[in-house]
Amino acid sequence: MHHQLEKHYVNRVGWLRAAVLGANDGLLSTTSIVIGVAAAEPDRHMIILAALAGMIAGAMSMAAGEYVSVSSQEDTEKADLIREKRELEQMPEVELRELAKVYEKRGCTKETAMQVAIELTEHDALGAHARDELGINEITQAKPLQAAMASFGSFAVGALLPFTVSLLAPIKQMVYFQYGFSIIFLMLLGAISARAGGSSIKIAVLRICFWGTVAMGITALVGRLFGVSVA
């Protein structure tokens, strides 16, 4: 009899978060820039230039910000591991009791918790403390370069839609075309991210469309009232 392995999604959380955030930000920020410029100054040259500048600058900014942010997380994790390794060398008995306490809190009896702590310490002491005491494992471990690349690529992909629309859409209906195509893409993005993460597609689509409409509506209003674009 064959047993089907359970399907889990938590191992995707690192790159999925960065990819969804990047694509969503790329689409919304670039569309908002284009809508603001189109509402203030309906000139195709200016609109295309604004879309291109927003796409390039935004992608670089997202990648740099994500790299710095995740690198800080990685530095903290490394510092914790170094400190834990030193404590294991200097006071192994204390660390063993700390590990056993963790398993007690999870429901093991005192004797079982100590036995588990002893066996895991003999197998890989630092790995056991990193995983069960500090909460650091291969799934949640910070990966700065991966996060930065995912953010850069996804932002560029998201920003490509409003840039393409700025090239092809009629000038007089530019705002409506930008909004319409962006909402469709946001619905698709919400569905894909929910599917990849194993969550509710309906809730993800409604949430991303609502906030996307708010962002684009406010920017269009600002552009119309003041004759400027706001990113």
Image: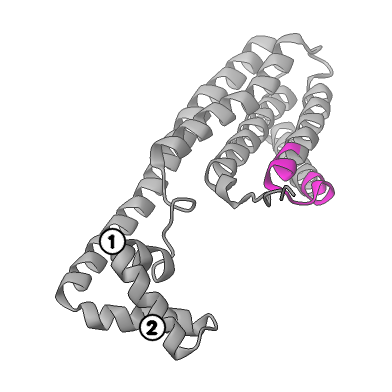
Q: Who's the residue at 53% across and 21% down the image? A: 53
- Nearest the viewer among 150 and 66 is 150
Q: Which residue is mark 1?
A: 81
Q: Is residue 201 magenta?
A: yes
Q: Amino acid at mark 1?
A: Leu
* Mark 1 surroundings within 10 Å by alpha-carbon count, few (fewer than 14), some (14 through 19), many (20 or more): some
Which residue is situated farthest in the bottom direction here? Answer: 110
- Nearest the viewer among 223 and 151 is 151
- Asked which quadrant contains residue 162, the reply is top right
- Asked which quadrant contains residue 45, the reply is top right
Over which residues does the magenta segment extend?
A: 192-206
Point out residue 203 in the picture as x, y percentages from the top left corner. 81, 51
Mark 1 vs mark 2, CA separation in Å: 22 Å
Given this view, does label 1 or label 2 mark the residue nearer the observer?
A: 2
Q: Who's the residue at 73% across and 37% down the image? A: 192
| Residue 162 visible in image | yes
Q: Is residue 123 left or right of residue 36?
A: left
Q: Which residue is mark 2?
A: 114
